[in-house]
Image (spheres, rainbow, N blue to C red):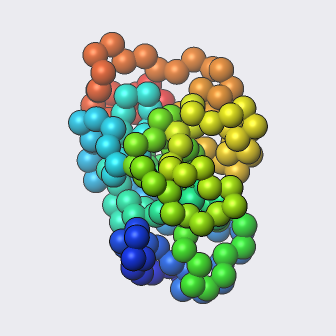
Amino acid sequence: MIGIGYHDLKGRVVLATEAIPSGVVVCSSRIRGLAPERDMYSLQKEENVHLYIDEPGQIFSHSCDPNLTVRDNEYGAFDFVTVRPVQEGDELSFHYGMSEAESVAVAACCCGSAKCQGRSVGFRELTDEQQAELVRLGVSDFLRRWYEGTPRPVMAHGYQTYAAMQVQM
């Protein structure tokens, strides 16, 4: 269903090896470790919790017009799910604002979309309309709670262990 390819500007990318309909989980990622702080390879799980996940999840590209969304999964990481039909050979990508409140990953976006914002933009950096569109497609549970205004776990001293975070979820 998916394979790894190479893009001159992005490096390794994930490609569809066959046509994939909308609503299909193309990758169910697992945690490799906790990031000491937000970086260009981490995915945000809670306010001050950033994870490293296994491949291919770790290398899905950013797109301002994504064909994937993220969904929190039973492994404490994310499933990557198609939001529209994907053709064989298409690059699989998600909007990094679907998991990141603020994004530091892509300083110069090269998604090529008519919706391109020039760089990866975190969820809290988006307009209300853009946030609503990402929520419609699907965002992490953490960002959905923030968007809906429900209380979020408060972490007194920055980072906490993943086990402690699981107790709060």
46 to 69, vertically: above or below? above
Nearest to the observer: residue 111 or residue 73: 111
Nearest to the observer: residue 107 or residue 158: 107
Give the x, y percent position of residue 59: 40, 64
Left or right, residue 135 beside residue 32: right
Left or right, residue 118 beside residue 60: right
Nearest to the observer: residue 120 or residue 82: 120
Give the x, y percent position of residue 13: 43, 72
Give the x, y percent position of residue 167: 40, 28
Give the x, y percent position of residue 143: 57, 34
Q: In the rendered image, which quarter contains the N terminus?
A: bottom right
Give the residue furthest to the top. 156
Taking the spot 27% from the left edge, 42% from the top edge, the residue there is 34
Left or right, residue 124 beside residue 10: right
Taking the spot 61% from the left edge, 85% from the top edge, the residue there is 88
> Is residue 75 in view?
no
